[in-house]
Image (cartoon, coloured by chain):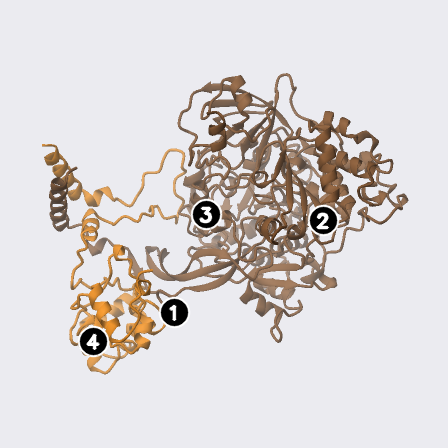
Amino acid sequence: MRSALVVSALILAGSLGCRMFDPAPRPSASVPPALPGQSTGVFTTARATFGEAVEDFIGRHPRKPEQPVEFPHVVHAGKGIGCTEYCHESVTTGPVAGLPSVRTCMVCHNTIATDRQRIRQITAMRERGEDFVWRRVFDYTPEAHVRFNHAPHIRAKVDCATCHGPIAQGTVAERNVDMNMGFCVNCHNERKASIDCLTCHF
Amino acid sequence: MDRRSFIKLTAVSGTTAALASCGNPDHQLVRFVPDEDIVPGQAVWKPGVCPLCPAGCGLTVRVMDADAEVVRDGKSGVVQILAAKKLEGNPNHPINRGGLCARGQAAIQVTYHPDRITQPLKRTGNRGDGTYAAVTWDAAIAEAVGSLNKLASGGNARSLAFLGRPDNGHRRALIAEFLARFGAPAAVTYELFADDVLRRANGMSFGSAQLPTFDLANTRYLLSFGADFLGTWNAPVSHARAYGEMRQGQPGVRGHFVQIESRVSQTGASADEWVAIRPGTEGALALGIAHVIMRDKLQSAGAAAGAAIPGWSQGLPDYAPEQVEKLTGVSAAKVERLAREFAQRSPAAAAVGGAALAHTNALFTAVAVNALNALAGTVGKPGGLVFTPQMDVGAAAKIGARPSAAMSMQQWAAALLAGGEPAAQALLIDGVNPVFTAPRAWKVRDALARVPFIVSFGSFLDETSILADLILPDHSFLESWSESLPESGSAAGVVSAAPPVMKPLHQTRATPDVLLEVARQLEKPLELPWQTFDEMLAMTMTPLPAMTEGVDAWTDAQEKGGWWGELPTAIRLKPDSTAIRLKPDSTVESGFSRIQPESGFGRIQPEFDGDPAQYPFHFLPYPSNQFLDGSLAHLPWLQEMPDPLTSAMWSSWIEINPQTAARLGIVQGDLVEVTSQHGTLRSAAYVSPGIAPDVIAMPAGQGHATFTRYASGRGENPVGLLAPMTEETTGAVAWAATRVKIARVGGPDGRLILFAGGMREHVEHGR
């Protein structure tokens, strides 16, 4: 009986999730009201919604998350543009590959294929000064304690497709490879890279 | 909960999550296109200067990509920026050599504070109720310029006033030049825990009116009269590093350290010996020690060392150990022993500061301790005190000397209330909060109410800036050119300076640049010799000798976070020529005869406010380890940082000796009321063995009425109890010269928040 109560309370909490994480805090009596221009948000490490929190908790991430524009990887790769050339260029210098901003797209699309519907959408974003909110495709759960750095892998001439699969042949990025520890260790063994725990877990 | 119901719950919550359709992307903030080229995931370290205290420590700032909430064209959203993420000490900086105190670590929160003022504001409601409307920078500057024009054209330039903090950097020099060219009086500066008395004493004793640097690394015996040099006083990071050298730097050598104070400070807790002394009698103890040294001829120092002190040439007959015991409460045997140790374990040094100089006789105390240093023969020598050469910004910037301070805050407020000259018509406030930190009897708030137009450059709304009619918020130190001229902490000259490490988060502007803009827009432009603040820095720093071969000093300083080395004499502050000089080897006394003890020292005996019969306890407010005088109480990391001695956090407390507490029936956490002739407050009792039975201590810093969501309405401000007692020659607040009475008014009500269970020794002794 008691567990039934807990369960129903939980369902209620889940359905009210959005409202409960209302970003506007109620100021206490002694605190003066916010001044013009000040953020009224309270920083929290919690997820925006109950749903997101639970999905995160059980490690469920969509294989093919919905992106702000349906970027056709195959078209660009087909024109001979390398992954690291314009769009993911910090892959050679830093731990994170980097995702292109509207500015990056407009370097070429200021003049190329300007009449396409998707390009018009991006041009409109630039005019509004807005950028993409890309959604993550590949990630590790925090409890895996893995720190991945792209740059050394690029220097070792590991092909992007080795880990990211045939993204260049598809449109929107999709997680086709299951990057578990065995996957990493196999490759490290084959290429005689270090398999010391601290190589990745630090 | 058993395993089975846990699994059930997990299943149910998973289903709920799947059903929840909250993650609608339409509700997300707009993401703006970034304006800088950013390599994600890669950190860059840039130099900076810590702004939180005048020590001027060098920083190295970790800068990385981050998402910042911004407002662009009236739309709020998120943009990727290069943002400062972590502060560390600059390992090459001569003051802190890679160290950074806990306050410095928390400085990063100044930039990202949720209650930071993000754009110019104009008051719309009544003064003090905190209602403001957003205005553009153009409109705000036009309003300030308009009001200054009105003063200048009406011949009332002298009725422009400026309140600031006492320091000697480029920013102050720029402000001084602005005011002088406008025709206004010099800025009024104020700081509760200022070291004015010590500067004056050092000017009199050594010809250098500045804070001393102790070469602790080579000191073998250190007597500290109330100086909290490891916590809140002088350059704590520099001294803490040197102190580590003194204690453990050489195998088999461990310098001895005796702390003399009526309440154990963080520094006192590190000492080999704590000598509890009657408040205000530290100078008498110093002279008692000097008496024994001279009587027993333990040191061959000349008589000139303490020439200004009555009776010095006769060997201080009034300060025999028995007399000193009567005055100070320190036993005659202990005076003899301290004197012997001080004389025999060379090099020895004596430091004085903090509560010892918060009395009406502070100048006497400071000069007495200085004389003891001269007697030890270590002034300017290894193991003794040295003075950091200081840049004369006026000379370096080719603007000449401007008066540093016209009036004290007390005189200024009194003149304004009395309706005398100059009646301030417009007031600019930069980085000072006297409504919170000045004794209530000075009536600073009432004085400010008389000023028709107040402009604040503050980044936060505090008790003083909430009275402003116009707020022109400054950049944070990470967003602007930052600089500091360290007054102590190094044997070589140091100028800390660094370029901005990140782009401004908000619609703020650097205050020096705003002043330069106002100066240009006035009807009669002030024609200051710089267009921007960094031009001024470049002007003073380019001619400095190069640190690296082939690189000019200014370019190099921007990379290194400052300049250090031999300061050219042309731009070095001249020693105070009016000073009496203590030359240990000199025996000539006639040169000092013009200094009359009475006029030179003010008082020799301390005076206290309050009748001892009615107010039996000495009240000792002390600079908080977290908040200093309260100017850092808005930083939540510091609020949650446990005090090193009591482990208290997020609160105020009153320290009481266990015997006194037992006598008054007070136990830990009880609500007690402390009353002076000037005010009363209630706070929680903290029973501490580290305090004399006739002293009640309380940290400053809490008790803000208005200071962001973290500090407002939290704890109590001991300044409310202070009597308007001052050291008369300098006008410095004698903040330890108030007497109080205390009474228990109730049991623990949860307002005392301790991180740990209290002092273990205390608990175990009582077992």
Colour orange maps to chain: A
On the same chain: label 3 and label 1? Answer: yes
Q: Residue furthest front?
A: B252
Q: CA gap, disc 4 to disc 3?
A: 45 Å
Numbered mark located on residue A5 in the image: none
- Residue under circle 1? B37
Say which of marks 2 and 3 sits in front.
Answer: 2
N-terminal label among 2 and 1: 1
Q: Colour of chain B?
A: brown
N-terminal label among 3 and 1: 1
Q: Chain of mark 3?
A: B
Q: CA gap, disc 4 to disc 1?
A: 28 Å
Q: CA gap, disc 2 to disc 3?
A: 57 Å
- Residue under circle 3? B121
In this rendering, the answer to whether A173 lies above or below B240 is below
Q: Chain of mark 4?
A: A
Q: Chain of mark 1?
A: B
Q: Chain of mark 2?
A: B
- Residue under circle 2? B347
On the same chain: label 2 and label 4? Answer: no
Q: CA gap, disc 3 to disc 1?
A: 32 Å
**Residue B530 falls left or right of residue B705:** right
Residue A68 visible somewhere in the drawing: no
Rendering quarter of residue B376 = top right
**Residue B654 falls left or right of residue B29:** right
Residue B439 visible somewhere in the drawing: yes
What amino acid does circle 4 point to?
Answer: Asp
Q: Secondary structure at mark 1?
A: loop
Numbered mark located on residue A115 in the image: 4
Judge by depth and name the residue closer to the eye, B56 or B294.
Answer: B294
Q: CA gap, disc 2 to disc 4?
A: 83 Å
